[in-house]
Amino acid sequence: MTINEIQDEVIEEFLEIEDWMDRYQLLIDLGEEQEALPASEKIEKNLIDGCQSRVWIVCDEPGDGTLCFRAESDALIVKGIVSLVIRVLSGHTPDEILDADLYFIKEIGLTEHLSPTRSNGLLAMIKQIRMYALAVKAKNN
């Protein structure tokens, strides 16, 4: 699936739920489904700057030109948010990640329903994933 197809799928899932308390619950559920990172990967190098909660993102290169991301947070809602971002961007090439317009964030209402600190954290997560993509692209050229 393309990044936009995955975004459209996420939008559809969230728009089926009208109440924001239920959407928060969906985020929490998504976070709980996320596989935990081993303690060996919860290190400073993988920690995202700019997040109020602690968030770790790990980038794997399976060798097929794509990047796969794994993440964890110590806050349930944030863990759900990072799992959504990873769901959309993982499994794509660095160019696809760098060129992606992440419209799902606005479409599902995250921008208006997150606190300013969580919004900053979301931007920091996306920035870090794009930095991984940029680094891999530069390394491979």
Image (spheres, rainbow, N blue to C red):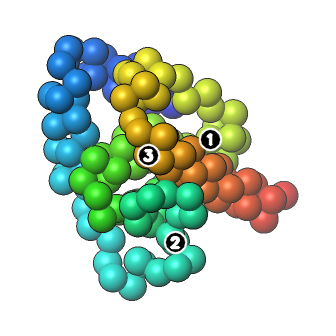
Q: Residue at x 19, y 52 (%)?
A: 33
Q: Secondary structure at mark 2?
A: helix
Q: Position of residue 32 (x, y in %)?
A: 18, 53
Q: Quadrant of residue 72?
A: bottom left
Q: Earlier in the sequence, mark 1 or mark 2?
A: 2
Q: Are marks 1 and 2 in contact (CB under 8 Å)?
A: no
Q: Examine the rendering and report whether any part of residue 104 can be seen.
A: no
Left or right of 134 in this view: 4: left
Q: Position of residue 62 (x, y in %)?
A: 51, 62
Figure quadrant of the C terminus: bottom right
Left or right of 9 in this view: 116: right
Tell me the tag on residue 118: 3
| Label 2 environment density (alpha carbons within 10 Å; few <14, some 14–19, many ≥20) | some
- Rounded to the nearest angstrom, the CA distance separating label 3 from label 1 is 22 Å
- Rounded to the nearest angstrom, the CA distance separating label 1 from label 2 is 19 Å
Q: Are marks 3 and 2 in contact (CB under 8 Å)?
A: no
Considering every residue shown, the one lying at the far front of the view is 116
According to the picture, the residue beneath numbered tag 2 turns out to be 46
The vertical placement of 97 against 41, above or below, is above
According to the picture, the residue beneath numbered tag 1 turns out to be 97
The vertical placement of 44 against 99, above or below, is below
Considering every residue shown, the one lying at the far right of the view is 141
Amino acid residing under circle 1: Ile
Q: Examine the rendering and report whether any part of residue 75 can be seen.
A: yes
Q: Secondary structure at mark 3?
A: helix
Q: Residue at x 48, y 22 (%)?
A: 106
Q: Residue at x 62, y 41 (%)?
A: 97
Q: Nearer the viewer, mark 1 or mark 2?
A: 2
